[in-house]
Image (tube, helix red, strand yellow):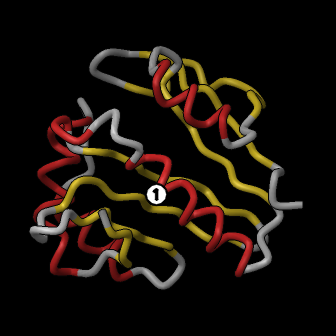
Amino acid sequence: MTIIPATPVHVQAISDIENDSYSTPWSYENIAVAVCDTNMINYAAVNPDGTLAGYAFMRHSFEIGHIENIAVAHNHRGKGIASLLMDTLFTQAQKRSMEGITLEVRQGNRAAMALYHKYGFKVEGYRRGYYKDPTEDAVIMRSWRLL
């Protein structure tokens, strides 16, 4: 597994994983814009055969990173790919002198929350009814592990 910067070549595969992973996925167009956005830090997890196994998008705003999206294809889950992507995001955050990283996660997404806790994220608050299909609260998390 290789972690490389996501490029426009990866947009369709990212869109496919996005659509398979989320009940309200980003559109193909939003993904295409995000891949080219200079304020985004985008990575793709690529298999030896060139297929995409996962991706991560993090916005860099001032001294804070905000993880916008991270997903791994169903047939590649449980193999440590999300951890590889998180390691890469944290490395890039340190290189850019970020002070911390924030994110929102569905309250019921226990696997994602366990991953985030592993990286030092703590619950900062909630956004009631933030997610749709089904309606669910977002847990706001932040990691200051970079300091």
Q: Position of residue 68 (x, y in %)?
A: 48, 53
Q: Nearer the viewer, residue 76 or 130?
A: 76
Q: Position of residue 117 (x, y in %)?
A: 67, 32
Q: Residue at x 19, y 72 (%)?
A: 10
**The N terminus - image quarter:** bottom left
Residue matched to label 1: 85
- Quadrant in the picture for residue 113: top right
- Local SS, label 1: helix
32 vs 30: above or below:
below
Task: Judge left or right: residue 103 versus residue 51.
Answer: right
Task: Judge left or right: residue 49 versus residue 123.
Answer: left
Q: Nearer the viewer, residue 26 or 105?
A: 105
Q: Residue at x 44, y 61 (%)?
A: 57
Q: Residue at x 81, y 52 (%)?
A: 145
31 vs 21: above or below:
below
Q: Position of residue 106 (x, y in %)?
A: 48, 25
Q: Nearer the viewer, residue 54 or 67?
A: 54
Q: Position of residue 87 (x, y in %)?
A: 57, 59
Q: Nearer the viewer, residue 60 or 109?
A: 109
